[in-house]
Amino acid sequence: MTLKKNNPLRLDVSHVARQSPGTYRTFDLHFPSLHFEPDLDLHDLEGEITISVTDDGVAAEGQLSAKTELECTRCLEPYQQTLDIHFTEIFSFSPSQDEEDDHKEQQLPPDGYIDLEPLIREYALLDIPIKHLCSEGCKGLCSVCGANLNHEDCGHRQEDIDPRMAKLKQLLDEEEMEELGRE
Ligand SMILES: [Zn+2]
Ligand SMILES: [Zn+2]
């Protein structure tokens, strides 16, 4: 599903926006799969959007979760990363007059439709961890043969060896073997 045509994340809040301040309405979202231009795919996007009426606009509060496919930096396997998408965004009836205001409020569109797409995209991206790990205990790849150590034990010893030291280690190992041979 693409959001280009008939954007399903455009939320009609025109009705609730006409109610008195304090009124709120909750919208349930569930999308098996959505593509966000240009490069984000979310699966099992679900949760609630609560729209509450304030004195001069509406607040949109999102409590959503979704999954996205990432590649584990240790074992290089694709995996599904769960993302928490939480936000509160204010849409005012009339734009703020204060040019100096750091927190720019958005204006509620005249047709009463809030586009959740940029919000969900932004907050989903914020929740993507810097380190992509399929699991905390991912064992990664064997530094000798490249086997995925989560799936098999290839028998190699995993050591962080500086390539420049590898030669020296090899010599020491040979010496050790010789010594063992002499005993
Ligand atoms: Zn992994
Ligand atoms: Zn190995």
Image (cartoon, rainbow, N blue to C red):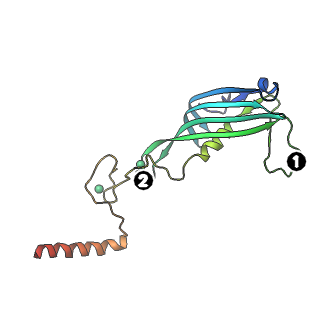
> Relative to 47, is 94 on the left or the right?
right
Location of mark 1 (residue): 98
| Location of residue 20 by image quarter | top right
> Relative to 158, is 7 on the left or the right?
right
Q: Which mark is residue 48?
A: none
Q: Is mark 2 within 8 Å of ligand 1?
A: yes
Q: Residues within 10 Å of mark 1 (few under 14, many from 20)?
A: few
Q: Position of residue 52 (x, y in %)?
A: 75, 31
Give the residue type that dot 1 points to: Asp
Q: Earlier in the sequence, mark 1 or mark 2?
A: 2
Between the C-alphas of marks 1 and 2, the distance is: 49 Å
Secondary element under disc 1, as helix, strand or loop, is: loop
Q: Residues within 10 Å of mark 2 (few under 14, many from 20)?
A: some
**In this view, 175 is above or below 150:** below
**Which residue occupies the foreground of this view, 46 or 35?**
46
Q: Which mark is residue 74?
A: 2
**Which residue occupies the foreground of this view, 92 or 34?**
92
**In this view, 181 is above or below 4:** below
**In this view, 75 is above or below 17:** below
Please identify the residue farthest to the front as the structure is shown: 22
Task: Residue at 62%, 28% (x, y): give it.
Answer: 29
Task: Residue at 42%, 53% (x, y): give it.
Answer: 74
| Location of residue 94 by image quarter | top right
